[in-house]
C-alpha cells in the first residue's frame, strides 16, 4: 500500500480519527499535485539566495572593516583624505543598515529601489547581502581589534607593511576568533531568507504560503518549512564545527 | 648609527619623553635601566617608530625616520625588535615565524630562508623545534625563537624591550646567554632591561632614565660603582 492508497482509504472514512485526519492533511500538504517539488524548489532558492547574500555580505564586510580599521590605525600626520571619506561612507552604511529592520530594507529595495525589476529572488539576495555586510563588518572589526596589538607590532617591526601584516598575521588569527560570531551571523542570514517572500522571492515560505492558500490547512506546510530550515542550519553548524576544529591545530599543546 | 635629537613623546597630554638627545654608534651595546614609567620602553619603541614621536628627530644610518616621506618598512627591516611578551605568531610554526618576513619582503627565496632558519635555530639551541607551534614551547624557548626571528632579517641593530621580564626566573639565563653571544659577535644592541648583571657585564654603556629624560649615563663600571645622580643612587640601592 502506498501513500496515495492510504490517503484514499482514509478519505472514504465517514468519521476519520485524529491521526487519520492528520495524515490526510499531510498528504495534501506534501504529496498532492507533487507539492513536495515546490518545497524543494523553494529550498534550492533559499540555498542559492543564502550563498549569494553570503558572498556579497562577506565581501562588503571585509571591505568596510578594512577601511574602518585602516582609517583608525593610520600614522599620525599621515591622514589620507580619501580614506576619511570612505570611512564616513562606511559609518553611514553600517549605521543605517543596523538601525532599520531587515523587513523594511527588503520592502524598500523591492518596491522602491528596484521597483521595475522582475528578478525578485536576486533583489532579495542583494538586500540580504547588503544587510549582512554591515553586521559582518562589525564582527570582523571586533575581531581585528580584539587581537593583541603586539602581534601587529611584531609584524611591522619585521618590516612588513600594513597590508602584509594584516594578511599574514592579523587576519588569520582574527578569523579564528570571530568564526563563532560569524557562524551565528550566517545562520541568521540563512533564516532571514524567509523574509524575501514579501518581495515575491520564491523561496520555501513563498511556496508554503501558496500551498496553505490552496489547502486551507496551515500546520503541515509551515512545519515542513520549519524542518527544512532546521536541517539547513544543522548542516551548516556541522560544517562550522569541522572548520573550527581544523583551525585549532595550532592550539594543541 | 642612530642619532636621536630632542625626542619628545606625549600620550594625550601626558609627556613621557621630555627631549632626549642620544647617539648610538655601530657596535655599541647600550643598556637602558630605570624605574617603571620613566619612559625607557617608549624611548626604545620610538627608535623603530612603533611609537610616533611628537617632537624631535631620529636618524638611522643617515635617514630621518621621523620624516613621513621615508619608507619606514624598509628601515624597520634593518632593525630587529624583541618584545617582552615575545609576540610570536601563534598560528604559525616556529619555522614559519622565522621565514615569513624575509620571504614576503623578497630578501630571500623560500629555500634560502629555510636554510637560514635552520642555522638560527641551531644558534639559539632549538634545532628540533622547527615544526612546533609557539604554544608548545616554554617562555624561554619562545623568546629565543623571537630573537632568531629578528635575526633572520640580518638587522644592523637589535632592539630589546625587557626581553626577560615575562620569563620564569629559571629561563632568564638561557635568553641572556643568547644575547651575550650576540653581543660578542659585534651586534649593535639597545636593551631595556632590569637585569643589572647583564647590563654590567655585557653593555658598553648604561643609560639611566628617570621622568622622561636620561638622568645619567656612563660606562658600566663607573655607572654601578660611582653613581652621581641621587635618583640613580636610590634606584641602585633598591635593585642591587
Image (cartoon, rainbow, N blue to C red):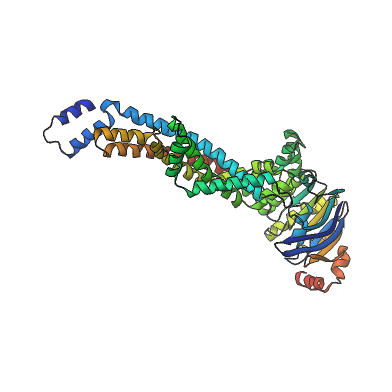
Q: Where residue A99 sits in the image (x, y, percent)?
A: 49, 49
| Observer-nearest of A149 and A32 | A32
For this view, does B154 lie left or right of residue A174?
Answer: right
Closer to the camera, B238 or B173? B238
Percent position (x, y) of residue B7?
A: 81, 59
Q: Is residue B72 visible?
A: yes
Q: Residue at x 80, y 43 (%)?
A: B154
On screen, B10 above or below B102?
below
Q: Quadrant of residue A173?
A: top right
In the rendered image, the vertical position of residue A23 relative to residue B176, given as above or below:
above
Q: Where is residue A231 in the image (x, y as percent from the top left)?
A: 38, 37
In this orientation, which residue lies closer to the viewer: A27 or A89? Answer: A89
Q: Quadrant of residue B70?
A: top right
Whole-percent x and y of residue B145? 71, 48
Vertical placement of residue A12 versus A173, above or below:
above
In the displayed structure image, the side of residue B195 where residue A9 appears, left or right: left
Amino acid at each position: 500500500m502506498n501513500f496515495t492508497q492510504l490517503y484514499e482509504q482514509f478519505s472514504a472514512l465517514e468519521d476519520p480519527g485524529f491521526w487519520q485526519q492528520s495524515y490526510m492533511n499531510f498528504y495534501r500538504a506534501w504529496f498532492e499535485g507533487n507539492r513536495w517539488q515546490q518545497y524543494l524548489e523553494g529550498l534550492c532558492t533559499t540555498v542559492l539566495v543564502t550563498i549569494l547574500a553570503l558572498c556579497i555580505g562577506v565581501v562588503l564586510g571585509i571591505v568596510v572593516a578594512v577601511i574602518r580599521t585602516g582609517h583608525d590605525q593610520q600614522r599620525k600626520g599621515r591622514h589620507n583624505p580619501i580614506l576619511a571619506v570612505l570611512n564616513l561612507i562606511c559609518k553611514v552604511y553600517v549605521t543605517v543598515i543596523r538601525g532599520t529592520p531587515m523587513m523594511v530594507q527588503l520592502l524598500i529595495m523591492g518596491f522602491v529601489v528596484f521597483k521595475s525589476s522582475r528578478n525578485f529572488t536576486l533583489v532579495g539576495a542583494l538586500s540580504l547581502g547588503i544587510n549582512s555586510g554591515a553586521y559582518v563588518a562589525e564582527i570582523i572589526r571586533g575581531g581585528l581589534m580584539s587581537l593583541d596589538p603586539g602581534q601587529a607590532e611584531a609584524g611591522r617591526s619585521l618590516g612588513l607593511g600594513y597590508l602584509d601584516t594584516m594578511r599574514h598575521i592579523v587576519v588569520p588569527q582574527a578569523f579564528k576568533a570571530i568564526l563563532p560570531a560569524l557562524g551565528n551571523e550566517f545562520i541568521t542570514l540563512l533564516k532571514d531568507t524567509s523574509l524575501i517572500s514579501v518581495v515575491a522571492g520564491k523561496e520555501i515560505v513563498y511556496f508554503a504560503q501558496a500551498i496553505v492558500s490552496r489547502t486551507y490547512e496551515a500546520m503541515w506546510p509551515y512545519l515542513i518549512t520549519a524542518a527544512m530550515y532546521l536541517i539547513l542550519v544543522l548542516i551548516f553548524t556541522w560544517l562550522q564545527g569541522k572548520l573550527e576544529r581544523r583551525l585549532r591545530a595550532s592550539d594543541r599543546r | 648609527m642612530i642619532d636621536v635629537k630632542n625626542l619628545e613623546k606625549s600620550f594625550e597630554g601626558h609627556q613621557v619623553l621630555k627631549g632626549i638627545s642620544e647617539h648610538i654608534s655601530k657596535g655599541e651595546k647600550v643598556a637602558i635601566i630605570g624605574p617603571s614609567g620613566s619612559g625607557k620602553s617608549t624611548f626604545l619603541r620610538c627608535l623603530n617608530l612603533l611609537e610616533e614621536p611628537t617632537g624631535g628627530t631620529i636618524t638611522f644610518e643617515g635617514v630621518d625616520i621621523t620624516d613621513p616621506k621615508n619608507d619606514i618598512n624598509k628601515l624597520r627591516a634593518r632593525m630587529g625588535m624583541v618584545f617582552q611578551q615575545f609576540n610570536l605568531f601563534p598560528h604559525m610554526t616556529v619555522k614559519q615565524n622565522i621565514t615569513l618576513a624575509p620571504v614576503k619582503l623578497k630578501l630571500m627565496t623560500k629555500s634560502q630562508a629555510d636554510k637560514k632558519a635552520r642555522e638560527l635555530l641551531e644558534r639559539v639551541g632549538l634545532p628540533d623545534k622547527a615544526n612546533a607551534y609557539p604554544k608548545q614551547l616554554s617562555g624561554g624557548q619562545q623568546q629565543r625563537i623571537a630573537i632568531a626571528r629578528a635575526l633572520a632579517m640580518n638587522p644592523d641593530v637589535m632592539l630589546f624591550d625587557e626581553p626577560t621580564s615575562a620569563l620564569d626566573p629559571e629561563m632568564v639565563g638561557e635568553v641572556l646567554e643568547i644575547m651575550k653571544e650576540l653581543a660578542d659577535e659585534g651586534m649593535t644592541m639597545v636593551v631595556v632591561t632590569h637585569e643589572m648583571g647583564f647590563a654590567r657585564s655585557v653593555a658598553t654603556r648604561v643609560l639611566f632614565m628617570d621622568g622622561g629624560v636620561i638622568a645619567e649615563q656612563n660606562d658600566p663600571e663607573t655607572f654601578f660603582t660611582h653613581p652621581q645622580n641621587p635618583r640613580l643612587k636610590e634606584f641602585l640601592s633598591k635593585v642591587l
